[in-house]
């Protein structure tokens, strides 16, 4: 059935690694240069010096990419041969099944197409080396210019400018130009596009030549889940190569074959295989509909198509690679790596939760960068754990959520508790709640209010339906209340709140938005309630 989409998606991992290794080395070199650059120099001196730095950087990029040329040739030749053999063998089986005699060997024309496809794709890689040196150097110059301007103008400190420049370089990685799209993309994206497109187009040309030799005119286009919407319209259907077979649309007209955006175009994973009238289609109508269902996947309560879900998975993978790149680059520049370690752990946990909810399989190779190995991963994990321990201790969280793993477990598997944790942390950091209150106690007091007060009626018959965020702030109290002139405000006990609501003096309703407030005065505290909604607004000790 042609070149399978999952094979196209995963082929070339060794080739990707060759360029990923080069990219890591180049970005690390850029980071070191940025970190050691003298930004406190006059404009004229800066212009002279930056040209020297650009020349050295371009030379380094050319060197790192060029010295991998031999490996690139070997890997690409092997991939092309595998793809050609796969396509020919798959089609040969279909022809033979339909009683057509097929030669044992591929024709000279097919061999020539394979050789031409290899040379053309190899040429694209050779051009990629030259253009990446140019656009990558321009990328480096841009970051140096911004950093010099910010430091020389006093807008940033040297350390801030250095970190900001490295962070921008780490977002998408080394710039490169795609000869398929003509756009400037990351080197990683261009390599993947070049490999997949070159292999698929070569295999398709071989198959069309094979069909011509077998005097066969009909082909069925492959189909796969998560196809881009424009391709989903024509996948899994039968077409005529020549357009002369009645009842079938011409392949080129229907699918855009031969164009950048069409069948076997840029990054396309579709292919085709011979079809003979009287045979059943490889894809049922139900199966094709399932591939494009708008509610095929549910994530965080939101329905989405398989295509949308796959795009989200790709986004998570890019974020994981981004923070790994930044971690390596910051280390090369002698800068702190805590932020990247924490962000990396966060995106890894988010991806883990996404895969759990959707049932998708992890694509580990898409999350890797070669310079971020086991030791770097261990160090980053330890940094993230240390950061969490210090943060949780500073706001009194650690008694209830002792480890970073437990924190993420609460985040993704206990949404109500996590929302309370977020609210508690924000209130402590803003000064509304004392860190001595402890999150465990916060949860305990919150639950007591929900269980012992919510659902009851006040002395004058108001049904209590819930509690405001501000109410919990007043229950726990603080040492320096930002809303009380920085003066300490003691907390209020649940028992005293209950007694006041049941037995306190009822003051007249105070007008205000959304129903105003009803105040109850007790011997130990006073409590305000929204008489219209039944929400507990605030309380104060007397």
Image (spheres, rainbow, N blue to C red):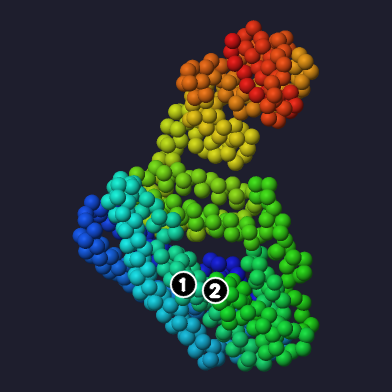
Structural distance between the alpha carbons of marks 1 and 2: 10 Å
In the picture, the disc for residue 178 is 1
Q: Residues within 10 Å of mark 1 (few under 14, many from 20)?
A: many
Q: Residues within 10 Å of mark 2 (few under 14, many from 20)?
A: many
Question: Who comes first in sequence, dot 1 or dot 2?
Answer: 1
Circles 1 and 2 in contact, beta carbons < 8 Å: yes
Residue 455 is left or right of residue 377, and the answer is right
Q: Quadrant of residue 249?
A: bottom right
Q: Is residue 405 visible?
A: yes
Spot occupied by residue 25 in the image (x, y as percentages of width and height): 34, 60
Residue 139 is left or right of residue 309, and the answer is left
Spot occupied by residue 260 in the image (x, y as percentages of width and height): 56, 77
In this picture, is 294 found above or below 131? above
Under tag 2, what secondary structure?
Answer: loop
In this picture, is 21 found above or below 413? below
Spot occupied by residue 321 in the image (x, y as percentages of width and height): 46, 55
Residue in the picture at 65% in, 50% down: 299
- Name the residue nearer the viewer: 22 or 319: 319
Q: Is residue 64 visible?
A: no
In the picture, the disc for residue 266 is 2
- Name the residue nearer the viewer: 90 or 500: 500
Quarter of the image where the N terminus is located? bottom right
- Number of numbered discs overlaid on the protein picture: 2
Residue in the picture at 46% in, 46% down: 343
């Amino acid at each position: 059935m042609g070149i399978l989409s999952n094979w196209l998606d995963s082929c070339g991992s060794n080739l990707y690694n060759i360029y990923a290794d080069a990219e890591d080395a180049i970005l690390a070199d850029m980071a070191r240069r940025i970190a050691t650059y003298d930004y406190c120099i006059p404009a004229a001196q800066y212009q002279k010096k930056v040209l020297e730095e650009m020349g050295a950087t371009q030379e380094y990029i050319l060197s790192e990419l060029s010295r991998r040329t031999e490996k690139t040739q070997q890997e690409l030749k092997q991939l092309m041969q595998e793809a050609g053999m796969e396509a020919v063998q798959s089609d040969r089986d279909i022809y033979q099944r339909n009683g057509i005699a097929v030669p044992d060997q591929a024709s000279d024309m097919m061999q020539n197409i394979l050789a031409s496809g290899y040379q053309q794709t190899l040429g694209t890689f050779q051009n990629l080396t030259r253009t990446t040196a140019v656009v990558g150097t321009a990328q480096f110059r841009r970051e140096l210019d911004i950093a010099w301007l910010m430091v020389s103008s006093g807008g940033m400190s040297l350390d801030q400018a250095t970190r900001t420049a490295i962070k921008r370089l780490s977002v998408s990685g080394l710039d490169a130009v795609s000869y398929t799209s003509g756009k400037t993309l990351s080197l990683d994206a261009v390599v993947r596009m070049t490999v997949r497109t070159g292999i698929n187009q070569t295999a398709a040309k071989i198959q069309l030549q094979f069909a011509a030799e077998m005097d066969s005119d009909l082909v069925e286009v492959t189909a796969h889940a998560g196809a881009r919407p424009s391709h989903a319209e024509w996948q899994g259907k039968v077409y005529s190569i020549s357009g002369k077979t009645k009842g079938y649309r011409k392949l080129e007209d229907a699918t855009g074959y031969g164009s950048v955006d069409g069948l076997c175009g840029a990054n396309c994973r579709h292919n085709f295989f011979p079809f003979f009238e009287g045979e059943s289609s490889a894809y049922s109508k139900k199966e094709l509909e399932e591939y494009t269902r708008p509610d095929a996947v549910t994530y965080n309560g939101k329905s989405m198509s398989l295509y949308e879900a796959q795009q989200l998975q790709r986004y998570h993978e890019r974020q994981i690679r981004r923070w790994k790149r930044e971690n390596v680059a910051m280390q090369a520049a002698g800068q702190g790596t805590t932020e990247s370690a924490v962000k990396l752990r966060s995106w890894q946990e988010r991806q883990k939760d996404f895969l759990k909810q959707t049932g998708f399989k992890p694509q580990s190779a898409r999350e890797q960068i070669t310079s971020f190995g086991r030791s770097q991963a261990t160090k980053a994990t330890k940094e993230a754990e240390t950061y969490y321990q210090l943060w949780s201790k500073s706001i009194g969280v650690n008694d209830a959520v002792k480890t970073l793993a437990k924190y993420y477990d609460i985040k993704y598997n206990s949404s109500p508790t996590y929302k309370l944790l977020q609210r508690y942390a924000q209130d402590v950091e803003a000064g509304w709640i004392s860190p001595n209150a402890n999150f465990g106690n916060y949860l305990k007091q919150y639950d007591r209010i929900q269980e012992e007060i919510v659902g009851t009626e006040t002395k004058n018959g108001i049904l209590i339906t819930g509690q405001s965020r501000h109410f919990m702030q007043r229950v726990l109290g603080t040492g320096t209340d930002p809303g009380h002139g920085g003066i300490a405000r003691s907390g209020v006990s649940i028992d005293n709140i209950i007694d006041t609501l049941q037995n306190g003096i009822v003051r007249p309703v105070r007008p205000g938005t959304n129903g105003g407030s009803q105040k109850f005065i007790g011997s130990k505290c006073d409590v305000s309630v929204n008489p219209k909604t039944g929400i507990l607004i605030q309380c104060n000790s007397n």
